[in-house]
Image (tube, rainbow, N blue to C red):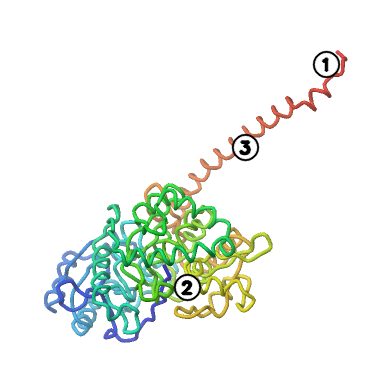
Amino acid sequence: MVVYNKIHEDSLRNIDGISSPSGFGKTTSIVFSLRNQIGHLASALQIFQENNINVVHIESRKSRMKDAQYDIYVDVETDNIRLEELINRLKKEVANITFNDITVPLSPPPNVEDPCDMSNVPWFPRNIEDLDFSAHRVLMYGTELDADHPGFKDDIYRARRNYFSRIAMQYKHGEPIPHIEYSGEEIKTWGRVFRELNSLYPSHACREYLRNIPLLVEHCGYREDNVPQLEDVSNFLKARTGFQLRPVAGYLSSRDFLAGLAFRLFHCTQYIRHGSDPFYTPEPDCCHELMGHMPLLADASFAQFSQEIGLASLGASDEEVSKLATCYFFTVEFGLCKQDGELRAYGAGLLSSIGELKHALTDNAKKIRFEPMRTSQQECLITTFQDVYFYTDSFEDAKERMRQFASTIKRPFAVRYNPYTNSVDVLDNTQCIATVVSELKGDLCIVSDALRRLQMLEKQLNECSPANQLDSPAASGYV
């Protein structure tokens, strides 16, 4: 999925939300933090009631902010005018407010001189279940299509998109991804894309892609006459690299999308591009996701590379998230790598676009070695070919360069993914770090023991080799 770098507007009147199922304005997500005061939640919710704003969903969790006890997540149905009034009143009552990924400055402002003050840190998910909060904050398309979208005037296509959007909005982590009965037209569109792309892969795709695409054919039903089901692909990836999928209705903000990668979770669309132009789509669809992303997410090194970009984004500033998203765009989406002296594509945007895949490997396309600091300044183009493509020698090379770049991100803590609990450990004190060191000691003991056993086995094999037996006194006739 191509992440969308959202532009923050100065005015609250420019808030965009998701069309409400009830038709009552827009559905907008708000997260606010409560100060340590008795009855504070009741006072905050009273403001919603007084402004005639309908709360359709509410959840709470422990807050890590200074002087705050709980983070409250709410979905509300309202128009922008009443939402502006609500935000202005809430600012006087709560410790922090974030809506649609925009942090509202409060009065008095937080102490920016305190490097450990978590109130300066944007909200980010700590558990994989927290992604339920952000997965439906779709910024573009979803059920709303622009006038230049190929399906804008197609009522049947728009109704179909509404169907896929409802599935994504209702999905909760841990549930099976609903099975989709694709129409004959959708299967036909998928088949044309599948057939054309497969004719290019042997000469254009990287070896990791070529190694994994047959496995998806075998285990997940990748065929010209069949659109694979996300649940099947998710189970396959989970067993291979620990990645899993969840349905999404359209574009997410860069912050929300990258946060999913930190948990080895990929937000994936289920709808298919409009059949009138099967080789073009202004947005990510399941042809892009399934053909472009999935084969590489089945590669262990690439999966780790993707997750590390996600982890680097947690708690980072808007500017730093934008830079990370741009690096993601020019690697995971449009990256090239050198293999056997030739450039091959590993970016999903290339591997799902027939025209751009051909173009990127010609002499007409400008190519530069991937350097995150330089790459993060490059403009991302959505509806045309890129002005420049970036290449690396290997995924390991890309990972090392991104690790160095991530180390420059300014935040008062580090993060570490805990695969046992599907959560992120925030390392902001010596006790947390000591716990990690203790766990690493156990891993190092296992590695050390394995090396010792291999050395013993190698020694035994050498002693039993024919060459050593011929050199022995008994073999030479001397006793």
Give the mark, 2 or 3, whose residue is nearer the N terminus.
2
Mark 3 surroundings: few (<14), some (14-19) or many (≥20) residues within 10 A: few
Q: In which quarter of the image is the C terminus?
A: top right
Q: Position of residue 39 (x, y in %)?
A: 16, 65
What amino acid is found at the position of numbered circle 2 in the picture?
Glu
| The quadrant where residue 41 appears | bottom left
Which residue is labeled 2 in the image?
320
Residue 186 sits above or below residue 469 on the image: below
In the structure shown, which secondary structural element does the residue marked by tag 2 occupy? Answer: helix
Q: Which of 406 and 192 is in front in this view?
A: 192
Residue 92 sits above or below residue 128 on the image: below
Q: Is residue 126 left or right of residue 326?
A: left
What amino acid is found at the position of numbered circle 1 in the picture?
Ala
Disc nearest the viewer among 1 and 3: 1
Q: Where is residue 401 in the image (x, y as percent from the top left)?
A: 59, 65
Residue 270 sits above or below residue 453 on the image: below
Question: Marks 3 and 2: in contact by CB < 8 Å?
Answer: no
Q: How much space separates mark 1 and mark 2, taking CA atoms?
A: 71 Å
Q: Which of 335 and 196 is in front in this view?
A: 196
In the structure shown, which secondary structural element does the residue marked by tag 1 occupy? Answer: loop
Disc nearest the viewer among 1 and 2: 1
Mark 1 surroundings: few (<14), some (14-19) or many (≥20) residues within 10 A: few
- Residue at x 62%, y 32% (from the top left corner): 453
Q: Position of residue 448 (x, y in %)?
A: 59, 38
Q: How much space separates mark 2 and mark 3, taking CA atoms?
A: 40 Å
Q: How much space separates mark 1 and mark 3, taking CA atoms?
A: 32 Å
What mark, if any, has residue 474 been given in the picture? 1
What amino acid is found at the position of numbered circle 3 in the picture?
Leu
Which residue is labeled 3 in the image?
451
